Amino acid sequence: MKKLISLLIAFLLLSCKKDKIDLPPLLENILPSSSEMPFNLILSENKFPNKIKKFYQLQNQDTLNILEFDKNKNLIFKYYKQYVDETWNGKFIYMIEANIYDNNKLIKTYYLHSNTEYEMFEYYYDGDNIKEIKSSLLGYTKGYNNNPHLLIKKLKDYPSCIDFIKKIETENKKRPNYVVEREFSNHEIKEYFNFSNNKDKESYKLYILNKNNKIQRIENFAKNKKWDINTKYFEYDKFNKLKKAYSINKKGDTLKSTEYDYKSPNKIVIRKENNIEISRKEFKKNTLIRYHYKGADGSYFGFEKYYLDKFGIPLKIIKKTNEIDTIYNLKNYYTFYK
């Protein structure tokens, strides 16, 4: 009887488990770990070797990236900076991300920026899928556009960053910023983006999923009316890999598209606007190794080539444009858990 009850409980737990859905990142181009900026390492944690503890990257004596991982290879700390110019206070904008996990699930992210207010993100789940994100502001901005929080450049490891955050949280009241909510219903998901003082249930993003829980279509609604021009479509190959993402206008013409090719050992990602190729990226094991781009009118062009170390991390970058050619030599350092 006890065995039967145990089997029944296990069945119920399994039947309640939500399959993970390949939803696009909610914080795309907000956090440094997802923003396409010069020298930024946009890499899956799985790219790094086992037992990785810390990684840092130098150009000459200048620290470009610092990444720290827990023993489960979850990214817990990221230090990143972007050059502005020689007259800018500090020359660089500094960005730091600290992540908190519970049972290997990301539950909180602190984002520190030397030129803006600090931000905290809290994540809530439905099975393995994020159903809600709450954004709150910490601290305050003084002397905006003059790098008022330049002091964070000294926070170059996870413990010192967490100590700094705890101090900020005790000194300043947390202020609600916005909330992203998702409603799951069979093969449809509604995603609402609401500021703290504006609860709008008539404007949302609608995800239509296929039988494999892959995104088939994304539609945008305002005042419960669909914006046809913003609809995005997705196609997959027989292995469930994304083959094409595109949007079309009311006449049925393709406005923008991204095509994915997996035939060669490397992955090729091609972006087009009005059927004109504007960029082509080649990835080796999810790491960018070549990047060609040009303006739709041909007014500018560029080429980037990345040479990788034995772990697949860039060691050398060659950039060529119609204005200037530059070579960047980098040094990578790793420490490991015993």
Image: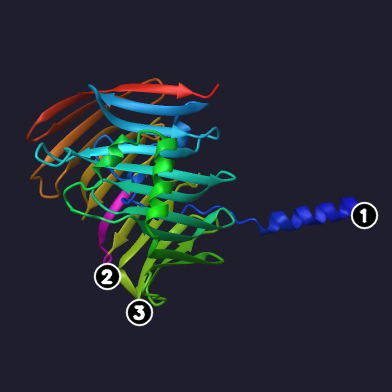
Q: Is residue 36 above or below residue 328?
A: below
Q: CA distance from mark 2 to mark 1?
A: 62 Å
Q: Secondary structure at mark 2?
A: loop
According to the picture, the residue beneath numbered tag 2 turns out to be: 250
* Number of marks: 3
In the rendering, at what x and y percent does residue 303 appear?
19, 33
Q: Nearer the viewer, mark 2 or mark 1?
A: 1
Badge 3 or badge 1: first in the primary sequence? 1
Q: Quadrant of the C terminus?
A: top right
Q: Indicate yes or no whether the magenta region holds residue 33.
A: no
Quarter of the image where one finds residue 90: top left
Q: Amino acid at mark 1?
A: Met
Q: CA distance from mark 3 to mark 1?
A: 55 Å
According to the picture, the residue beneath numbered tag 3 turns out to be: 223
Q: Secondary structure at mark 1?
A: loop
In the rendering, at what x and y percent does residue 255 appear?
24, 59
Q: Is residue 259 left or right of residue 293?
A: right
Q: Is residue 193 above or below residue 256?
A: below
Q: Nearer the viewer, residue 20 or 86?
A: 86
Q: Nearer the viewer, residue 216 or 49?
A: 49
In this orientation, does residue 197 appear? yes
Q: Residue at x 16, y 48 (%)?
A: 146
According to the picture, the residue beneath numbered tag 1 turns out to be: 1
Q: Secondary structure at mark 3?
A: loop
Q: Residue at x 49, y 47 (%)?
A: 240
- Residue most toward the front? 171
**From which residue to which does the magenta span run?**
249-258
Badge 3 or badge 2: first in the primary sequence? 3
Q: Indicate yes or no whether the magenta region holds residue 256.
A: yes
Q: Nearer the viewer, residue 135 or 12?
A: 135
